[in-house]
Amino acid sequence: MNKGIIEAIVEGMGLEGHLSDVQQIQTEHRIKLARFWEIKEGSRVLEIGCGQGDTTAVLAHFAGERGFVHGVDIAPPDYGSPMTVGEAAAKLKASPLGSRIRMDYGIDVLSDEVGFEDNEFDFVVLSHCSWYLKSFEELAAILTKVRRWARKLCFAEWDMGVDEPEQLAHYMAVLIQSQVECYKMNSFSNVRTLFTPEDIRELASEAGWTVSRQTAVHSPEMHDARWETDLTLAEAPAELDSPLPMPDKAKQLVRSQLKLLRAYAESGRPMRPMAVHAFVADKI
């Protein structure tokens, strides 16, 4: 992969040192997605759940000077760390890619106040954002509403299928988070609803999309397995000790899973992220 493209995109995001090195790996992964989705010069893209702009920057690069990317996210501008989404967006807007990007926060796509013209965009993209949603019903509603706005749906999310032992920690961390999440009233977790690839394809079909191409994207250099493992081990024990309306037997099950995850993390064995399921769908 062309390192010059990666470095140029990351430089535009205004990151330095370790953060820049990490972002280069994240950007390389998203370049794989953009190429699979066939985002091309002149494309008009609506990105749902743009976050700090990891995918937005890559989409803007591939859309080119004649293209445009409009990113929206329900999070407020001050959400996120070590850089908030608002700060990240400001840096990206100030970069050479900025003229072809718009990023709006605090936007609930399902609000009656949010709307676009029919087929205003060539693509609507949901990249690594579905697990942040509250429920199956919320994703179904989003997929249904955005169908009017774009000709194609581009989707990417982690695939819970474990292909190799090194992915086990990532799998366990996600599974633990999603089990605890079932009993929360409010949440800021990374995994709020766990969708499998089959779940997502079924919801897309019911919303009026037909999958035309799908693939598994492997990016073993990414740090997500370690991040999710560390986060789960740091936060889940306290959540289980809180006044969570979770049956004692279910709590004990999760505590046992945490012991297994901690043992794996402390063993020094390598961790790799799970593959990513990506697809392109056309509206019926």
Image (cartoon, grey):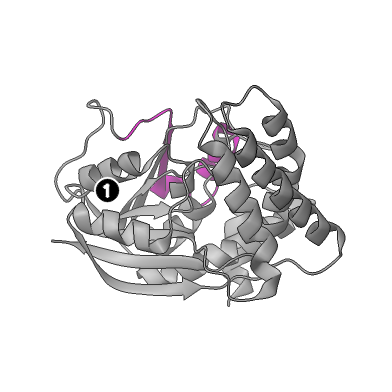
Quadrant position of residue 208: bottom left
Whether the magenta-drawn stretch holds residue 101 is answered as yes
Q: Which residues are magenta?
A: 86-109
Q: Residues within 10 Å of mark 1 (few under 14, many from 20)?
A: many
Q: Relative to 157, does residue 233 appear above or below in the rendering? A: above
Q: Residue at x 26, y 64 (%)?
A: 281
Look at the image and tell me whether residue 16 can be seen. no
Q: Position of residue 193 (x, y in %)?
A: 46, 44
How many discs mark residues in the rendered view?
A: 1
Q: Can residue 137 be seen here?
A: yes
On screen, residue 53 above or below 33? above
Side (left or right) of 95 relative to 243: left
Percent coordinates x, y for residue 207 in the rendering: 20, 51
Q: Which residue is mark 1?
A: 143
Q: Quadrant of the N terminus?
A: bottom right
Relative height, residue 131 to residue 83 (above, below): below
Circle 1: element type = helix
Q: Nearer the viewer, residue 270 or 94?
A: 270
